[in-house]
Each structure stands twice: as structure tokens, then as C-alpha cells.
Amino acid sequence: MIFQSTELPPFLAYRKGRLYLEELALEELGAQFGTPVYIYSAGALRAAYQRYLQAFTSVGLNLSLCYAIKANSNLSIIRLFGELGAGADVVSGGELYRALQAGIAPEQIVFAGVGKTAAEMDYALEQKIGTFNIESASELALLERRAVAVGQEARVSIRVNPNVDAQTHPYIATGRNHNKFGLNPTQSLELARYAAGSASLFLVGLQMHIGSQVLQVGPLVEAFKCLLSLASQLEVEEIYLEQLDLGGGLGVTYQDEQPEQPDKLAAAIADLLKEHQSKQPYRLISEPGRYLTANAGVLATSVLYIKQGELVDPCFAIVDAGMNDLIRPALYNAKHRIMPLHERPGALSQVYEVVGPVCESGDFLGHEVTLTELKEGDMLGLLGAGAYGFSMASNYNSRLRPPEILVDEYTARLIRHRETYEDLVFLED
Ligand code: LLP
């Protein structure tokens, strides 16, 4: 979904100066549940899911959508997508556990990651998951041994690294040959042949994921062409694939980005599949995370102190959310819009450094943010916080991780409690 930087994401709107998510004023939720607090819109999550799926179905593609639960791993969020028919993309035993707890059918789970352990493989084999996405020859060899030991055939897809530049932040670009992810086309063919010939492995397909916050579909289409060409080569050898997995990656608007949309991606994929001659139609998988959740979430925080810096401008707005709650600004220099939860009409604008309480100068949420003059106690909302927000939160500085709230029209449900001091030390001697 694209919106102009002057507009708000769908499901967010000012009414009489107060910022609402669906039918509830965020300031009231902040007061009721305390700040900092993550607040998500069920309507926005459902709408993004339908938009993504519809883009593919409307060009005649039957998409299996496996939600990348790393974006937002709360059980209620996974359950919400599960109820809409989603499977899950998981990258650890912990994420697999969450997906199963949320009721995702094992056969709708794909398991990615360069460093799966034997214990994680055993767990996933016992649960009979849909697909292991394989990223190295050693991993495939271990999976084969574990499949024999567990007595359960492993369904395998090879993650191809097509050496395509996704043109995103280097930390979240994964499709170039200097990245640790996937296998080059030659290695991919070798492993696919090996898996196809193994008694305890079952080769289901090929997978790709070239990066995250990808704003143009061009690189995704390039990478998919590479998958199709490998599929053709395998067919010549009478190795037939059931599925092709596009990975995730489509970007969203945080400030003024204009990301290309799923309909453009789906149309390009449909065209390529039409040109491609294969013995049977493929099951197409996609693993979106950010697209489904980013703009459905707000991190609400309160201004603790206003402090004039040594320099006249800007002044510091010290808020109660920090880099432990939302690490994206510090880690990727990401820019989340910061909006007052209650506008003060007529107030003068001022430039602020919006910073948290953590003991690091890297603990900022926004640089040079222009806001109408703030007072201590005012609440602010960080937009676009529904993806890689809470899921990347930590207890650094022994801070308690915030609660999470799911808004559905007029109701607000606490879907994760605020941690307590007892929670902090629970596992320690
Ligand atoms: N599939 C695989 C194999 C992935 O590694 C990822 C994300 C996804 C799907 C979902 O990608 P998405 O649709 O969300 O772009 N923490 C970073 C993002 C890291 C993404 C890692 N992999 C951030 O906050 O920007």
C-alpha cells in the first residue's frame, strides 16, 4: 500500500486532533495500558493480507502465502493470519513452536535459515513440516542423516542465490554472491539432483529470498527468472518440481518511499510462468512479512523530559521507548514517522531529537523531527512499527519489554503483557 508522506496509513486518522487506530484513540490506549506500548490494527493486518493474496489470484495464480513470522511473532498475530488461510515461514525451532502453537498446519510451514541445528531438524521432521529450505551442501547432508534417524522423509527446496542486487540496506540484502544466503545456480542444481536421488529426501522445489524492504519488483523478477531457468534444466533431466517459492521482501512506505505493489509483482510472475513450459503447474509460495504487518502497528510512547541541548537547536525529547523496544533506527538508520497522539492546535513547530532512556548515544528514535511544541507527558506514536518492532525488542539495560495490544474496531485486546521485574530474572540463579 502506498500513501503520500502527508497521508496516514489506512486505519489511522486524526479525529478532533486525536490520532485514532480504527475506532480507538491511541492516547487513551496509552493511558489505559501504559507506555511504551505496541498497538496493532486487526483491520490493517487483514487488509494487507487480502491485498497481497488478491494480487496473485486476480492474475490466475494460486498462491500459498507463508507469513514470515519473524516480522511480528506474537501468537495472536500469527493466529489472525492462520485464520485467513496463511501458512508460516519460520527460521528457528522457536518460530516453529510459535507457528504450531498458533495452529498453523505443519504442511503449510516452510523452514528457512543458514544455520539449522540437528535438534531443530529433528523437531521439524517429527512435526512433518511442509518444506526445509536448504542453504548448503553440509546442511543437506545433515538433514538426510536426521531424516534417516527420525524415520521421516524430509521435503526439501533448494534456496537459490541468484546474485541479484535487491537495492536495499546492505544488512537486509541477501541475494548477492557475497551474502551468506543460498547457493549459486550451479551448486543449486547439484544439490537438487542429489536430493532427487535420495531415498530419505524428497525434492519439492526451489526457493529464493533476495532481501527485505525491496522497493522495485525488477530484482525479484530477475531472480525468479533464474529459478525458472534452473527448473527447466532439471526437467530436461526428468527431475520435476512441485513448487517455487518467491521469498518475501516487498517494501512499504515509512516516510516517502513509493514501493511497487504486489499486483505488479504478481503480473510479472504470471507472465513468466505463461512463457515457461513445464510438465505441471507449480504451487507458488510467497513469504511476506513486512508488507503484512509494518503499517498495521504503532509504538506509543510518552515524553518524559524536554531537555535543551548544548546547541540551541535541536532540543531533546526524551521518551520512555528506547532502542531496546525499537532498534530499527539505531541498526539500519531507519526512519519511522513520529506523530503526536494529540495535536495541539496553534502550537509552534520545533525540531527535536527524539531519544530513549538507554545509556547509549545510538539510542535515538528520530533525528531532527519537526513536531508542534511538545510538553512533558505528551504521547507520540512511531508509525510503521508493526514489523521488526517488538520481534527485535530486547531487555537491554534490564528494561521491561512493552505490552502488545490488538485493536479490532471498538475493542482493544492485550495480546502480550508488559514484562515484570520477576520475568527479568526468572531464568537466572
Ligand atoms: N523469507 C525469508 C527467508 C527471510 O529471510 C525474510 C526476512 C522474509 C521471508 C520476510 O521478508 P519481508 O517480507 O519482511 O521483507 N530486521 C530487518 C528485516 C530483516 C528481514 C530478514 N528476512 C528490518 O527491520 O528491516
Image (cartoon, grey):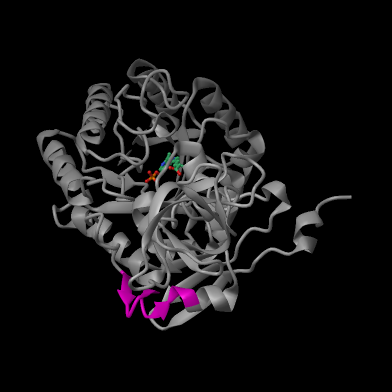
Identify which residue is drawn at 64% across, 48% down.
358
Residue 81: quadrant of the picture: bottom left
Look at 42% across and 42% down and name the residue there: 334
User: In the picture, which quadrant includes the N terminus?
Assistant: bottom left
Residue 252 x/y as whole percent? 31, 49
Q: Which residues are magenta?
A: 11-27
The residue lying toward the viewer, choosing from 334 and 109, is 334
Q: Is residue 393 magenta?
A: no
Measured as percent of width and height from the top left, residue 43 is found at: 35, 71
Identified at 54% across, 55% down, the residue is: 390
Q: Residue shown at 69%/63% (left/top)? A: 419
- Is 195 positioned to the left or the right of 261 in the image? right
Q: Determine whether, in the image, residue 281 is placed left or right of residue 328.
A: left
Decide whether residue 12 is among the magenta residues: yes
Q: Who is closer to the viewer here, 236 or 424?
A: 424
The spot of residue 250 in percent (x, y) is: 30, 45
Q: Is residue 151 above or below residue 384?
A: above
Q: From the viewer's perspective, is residue 283 above or below residue 118?
A: below
**Camera sees residue 300:** yes
**Which residue ends up furthest to the bottom in the rendered image?**
410
